[in-house]
Amino acid sequence: MKKLGVIIAAAILAAVIWETWSLYDGIQTKRERELTKASQTAMNQYHLKQVLEVSYYHGSHAYHVVKAVNQKGKKIYIWLPEGKGKTITKQVKEGWTKARVKQYTRDQLHPKKLIAIRPGIELNTPVWEVVFIDQKNRYTFFYLRFDGENWVKKIHL
């Protein structure tokens, strides 16, 4: 009887592990398809030479952000809305680089731990979203305008 219980418990554990893996794999596959679709949309609409990077941003509204090289050889960002919204394009040189945002964050915000820096959009304005742990151990979202002129908002959790 004890052996049967162990076999049943092992079977249940195996089923739970299998379902968890299937769910994770399904989510990752969907995300990869969406990033690929955003890349193809940007290539087709903007006749790009090369897509360098695609990321997903979900603030007030969801966007895929494509960093690419256009036909003139200029690096650009394209913010593609998911659903309704306005597509925005900017040359990389119009804004701050990720490295400059990182340095600004370290110098001005003094994070305990820097978690992520990614381009996004808030209030129809291209931004850099900086996620970090502040000195009071709060999870913090800081939104700096893409051009670095000023911050848009700051949220502590």
Image (tube, rainbow, N blue to C red):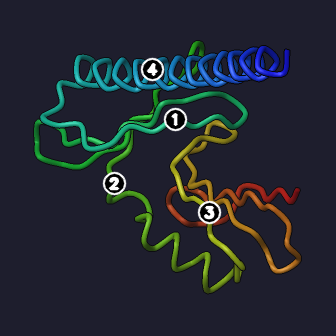
The residue pinned by badge 2 equals 92
Amino acid at dot 3: Ile
Q: CA distance from mark 1 to mark 4?
A: 14 Å
Left or right? Give the position of 4 relative to 89.
right
Residue 94's spot in the image, x, y percent? 38, 57
Amino acid at dot 4: Thr
Give residue 108's mark.
none
The residue pinned by badge 3 equals 115
Give residue 56's mark.
1
Displayed quadrant of residue 154 = bottom right
Amino acid at dot 2: Val
Residue drawn where x is 70% and y is 78% of the image: 111
Amino acid at dot 1: Tyr
Q: CA distance from mark 4 to mark 2?
A: 29 Å
Label 3 vs 2, first from the N-terminus: 2
Left or right? Give the position of 41 relative to 72.
right
Label 4 vs 2, first from the N-terminus: 4
Residue 140's spot in the image, x, y percent? 78, 61
> Does the residue at mark 1 contact the one at mark 2 (Cβ under 8 Å)?
no
**Residue neighbourhood size for the residue with mark 2, other residues' Cα within 10 Å, grouped as few (<14), some (14–19), many (≥20):** some
Give residue 29's mark.
4
Towards the viewer: 143 or 95:
143
Label 3 vs 4, first from the N-terminus: 4
Give SS at disc 4.
helix
Label 1 vs 4, first from the N-terminus: 4
Residue 90's spot in the image, x, y percent? 38, 44
**Residue neighbourhood size for the residue with mark 3, other residues' Cα within 10 Å, grouped as few (<14), some (14–19), many (≥20):** few
Q: Quadrant of the C terminus?
A: bottom right
- Mark 1 vs mark 2, foreground winner is 1
Q: Is residue 102 above or below residue 83?
A: below
